[in-house]
Amino acid sequence: MPHTPTVFLIDDDQAVRDAIGLLLQASGLAVETFASAADFLEAGVVQRPGCLVLDVRMPGLSGLDLQKQLRAQGYRIPIIFMTGHGDVPMAIRAMKAGAFDFIEKPFQGQILLARIREALDLDSRERRRQACRDSAAARMALLSPREREVLERVAEGQYNKVIAAELGISLSTVEIHRKRVMEKLKAESLSDLIRLLALLNAQS
């Protein structure tokens, strides 16, 4: 069963965790709270859908340290930083490193809620895109080396006769390979092939 998109709230201040946690729950959002970045990592929930809300400054592993570690491991969960006035330069650095947003304290609950919902929407869209990429990659892996060669040339707009001449094979063989490429990639037209290749290229 797929997990419900969850707000993972990390703050060393119990009062902050309780206040924001209640706000999110009252708004119908699923929330899980952690007293430290280390606790969050140990919980093994980083792959689940959702977003992170955390302070820039925390004892032990800081918010920036956690962001850096997650990015290094390939995780792209949206991160919203909460920051005091003196931490704004650090928050800007976090934004440049890929954070979704930072919100200065004290902040209005509705502003935080709005940004969290946007972050959850972004995570949902990115997960759908990644699922499409994974599916496309799996289909691409079914192609033989020769079928890949034909696909590359078809995508470049080459005619079958030109492809046959370049690869040193007959026109009918090109047509057979082309048909198999379309079947394996579940493409009904050349535009389908182009979109699929563009999707894969966007990942690299």
Image (tube, rainbow, N blue to C red):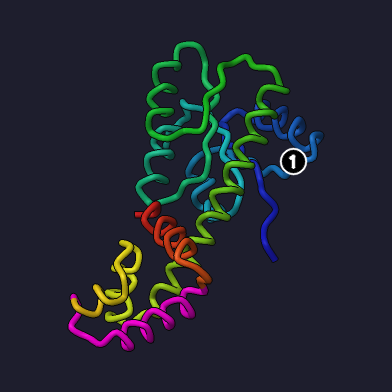
Q: Residue 171 falls in which quadrant of the image? A: bottom left
Q: Amino acid at mark 1?
A: Leu
Q: In the figure, 98 relative to 108: above or below? A: below
Give the secondary structure at mark 1: loop
Depth check, front residue: 94 or 135 = 135
Which residue is rendered at x = 60% and y = 28% of the image? 13
Question: What residue is at 41 percent from the left and 78 percent from the top?
Answer: 181
> The N terminus appears in which quarter of the rendering?
bottom right
Seen from the viewer's position, the closer of residues 99 and 173 is: 173
**Could you tell me which quadrant the C terminus lies in?**
bottom left
> In the image, residue 134 lies at what x, y percent?
47, 65
Report crowding for label 1: few under 14, some 14 to 19, many 20 or more residues within 10 A (C-alpha).
some
- For the point 66% across and 26% down, the residue is 112
Identified at 45% across, 50% down, the residue is 75
Per the image, the residue denoted by label 1 is 29
What are the residue bounds of the magenta stretch? 166-186
